Image (cartoon, rainbow, N blue to C red):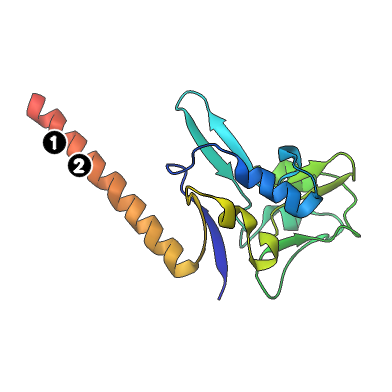
Amino acid sequence: MEKFLTVNSDKCTGCRLCELVCSVMHEGVSNPAKSRIQVVKWEDEGRYIPMICQQCEDAPCQSVCPVGAISRDKEFGFLKVDYDVCIGCRLCVSICPFGAMNYNKTTRKVFKCDLCGGDPQCVRFCEANAIEFVTADVVSSLKKREGATRQSAASKQSLVIWEHV
């Protein structure tokens, strides 16, 4: 069964351990710039958002690649980059709506999350459980819960407004 990485930014503490674990796993060095996951801080809100590849069904990165270096893994369903074919043109980096494609200046190749071959290390090491690796039905349940929570909060806020009128 296909699984997906999900992020709950409300739980993220900004420790960036996921970035370090990812870079060590893939590059053998503790360097967040070489991580396939990037934690972005929203200064105004004081929030941290782990940004990961969404493994888009109709992936713009795959369709824009002029040499066909990006394909879908048949076993796990994630998008992967064939580094022997990649020419480092960075079209995929520029078109990714999530900023999940990255470029390694040393190798002159693009890189992205490959779900660690089905065992994402960012999930294993996230102590806050902000990142999860779950099936599609669990993703749907989580989204419904988030939507219901937002709707409930909005309803309570509108009641408070009406009480003050």
Q: Quadrant of the N terminus?
A: bottom right
Residue 134's x, y, as percent?
A: 50, 65
Checking the image for residue 159, the label placed there is 1
Callout 2 crowding tier (Cα within 10 Å): few <14, some 14–19, many ≥20: few
Left or right of residue 102: residue 52: left
Mark 2–mark 1 distance (CA, rounded to whole Å)? 6 Å
Residue 159 lies in quadrant? top left
Q: Quadrant of residue 164?
A: top left
* Residue at (66% x, 44% y) in the render: 19
Q: Position of residue 121 (x, y in %)?
A: 64, 57
Determine whether, in the image, residue 60 is placed left or right of residue 135: right
Residues 89 and 150: in front is 150
Tell me, yes or no, if residue 165 can be seen here: no
Q: Quadrant of residue 97?
A: top right
Q: Is residue 1 left or right of residue 75?
A: left
Give the residue at x 83% y 59%.
69
Q: Secondary structure at mark 1?
A: helix
Report which residue position mark 2 lands on: 155
Q: Residue at x 86, y 39 (%)?
A: 105
Amino acid marked by disc 1: Leu
What amino acid is labelled 2 in the image? Ser
Location of residue 108 in the rendering, given as x and y in whole percent from the top left corner: 89, 44
* Residue shown at the point (62%, 47%) measured from the top left: 18
- Report the side of 96 relative to 161 (left or right): right
State the image coordinates of residue 13 (x, y, percent, origin top left): 49, 38
Q: Nearer the viewer, residue 9 or 100?
A: 9
**Foreground of the two, 47 or 86:** 47
> Circles 2 and 1: CB distance less than 8 Å?
yes
Q: Is residue 29 visible?
A: yes
